[in-house]
Image: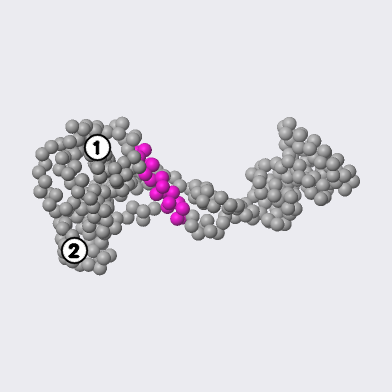
Amino acid sequence: MRKFFLISLLSVFIFSAAPAHAAKVVVNKVVAIVNSEPILQSDVKAFTKRLRQEGGVDESLIFEEAPLKVLKSNSKQQLEYLIREKMILSEVKKLNLTVSEDRLDSEVNSLAKRNQMTKAQFVEFIRKQGYSLNEYRQNLKSRLERQSFYEAEVISKLRITDEDALNEFRQKNPNYVPSLNEYTISQIFVPAKNIGPKAAMDRAVLLKQRMNSGESFEAVANAYNAGTSAAKDGFLGTFKAGEFNQEIENEVAALSEGGVSEPIKSRQGVHIVKVINKKNTQDPQFLRIKDQIKSYLVEKNFKRQLKNWFESKKQETHIQIL
């Protein structure tokens, strides 16, 4: 899951860092306060410049009601975005997720190494893009802290199970039917040999009515099978797919464990079947892509969970727009 939130070299220090001349903007007005954190007029001006750069903002904080296209021209939504950033910053401090200078040094060195650069080459590369190392470090610090917050307060709250992944797989593959590996069943069998098919069905219907009236399958089976060689409770055994009558197998496939069928007509007579246990094999294709589906579901549900967090947190956050 972490891979989805990894910070790439280009997206962080080329596209996301504030230009060097932004530091020269004169701070002359507080436009909002989030808890004790001010949002300055210079922050708003710097943000409009960030919006003109690809990857200049955190897409996780851009919601559907104000996509990037709207955000570029809507000053109210720009301030809302900056408020969200400040809310996360407050939570970072509260949860002690602040990134240390030593951690920043380690991250910078690691990025330089992964890109086969010495520290000096890395700094020179940043400089040629028009950014100072200090500006890059501050931007990286913010990204790392938000990433830690996302993992601690958003991703960890998402519960994506194998069943969720299978349901998603089924939705994308409507013709998918899990193959039945094996099933254990009990049955009441009314043979048609001596009494004929119609009488056998009539008798089976009466037996099923007794179950519908409250008698257990086992009680009806033992009473009906008394004096015969049938096993206790009508137990028949465990079978693999394709080893039993097709008519009965079709019914078994549609029943849950513990389920009892309606009377089933076969060439031999009429059956009432109870499923004791069944095991479904999972599609090999699903097993191959299960982890990918779970990652997709985390990504799909991440913004919803984050948005819910903001809505809840606003109730306890002091936000003052000046």
- Residue 200 in percent (x, y) is at 84, 42
Residue at 32 percent across and 47 percent down: it is 60
Q: Are marks 2 and 1 in contact (CB under 8 Å)?
A: no
Location of residue 107 (image quadrant): bottom left
Assess whether residue 306 is covered by the magenta stretch: yes
- Residue 233 in percent (x, y) is at 75, 43
Location of residue 213 (image quadrant): top right
Q: Looking at the image, which is closer to me, 177 or 37?
A: 177
Residue at 21 percent across and 32 percent down: it is 321
Q: Looking at the image, which is closer to me, 40 or 234?
A: 40
- Residue 73 in percent (x, y) is at 25, 42
Among numbered discs 2 and 1, the one appearing first in the sequence = 1
Q: For the residue carrying disc 1, how many other residues have a C-alpha within 10 Å: few (<14), some (14-19), or many (20+)?
A: few
Q: Which residue is mark 1?
A: 76
Assess whether residue 106 is covered by the magenta stretch: no
Picture quarter with the C terminus: top left
SS for tag 1? helix
Residue at 70 percent across and 57 percent down: it is 242
Q: Main secondary structure of the magenta part?
A: helix
Which of the two discs, 2 and 1, sits closer to the camera? 1
Q: Which residue is mark 2?
A: 125
Q: For the residue carrying disc 2, how many other residues have a C-alpha within 10 Å: few (<14), some (14-19), or many (20+)?
A: some
| Kind of residue indicated by mark 2 | Phe
Question: What whole-number distance in Å separates the C-alpha atoms at marks 2 and 1?
Answer: 36 Å
Q: Is residue 198 above or below residue 280?
A: above
The span picked out in magenta is 291-309
| Kind of residue indicated by mark 1 | Lys
Residue 212 is left or right of residue 36, and the answer is right
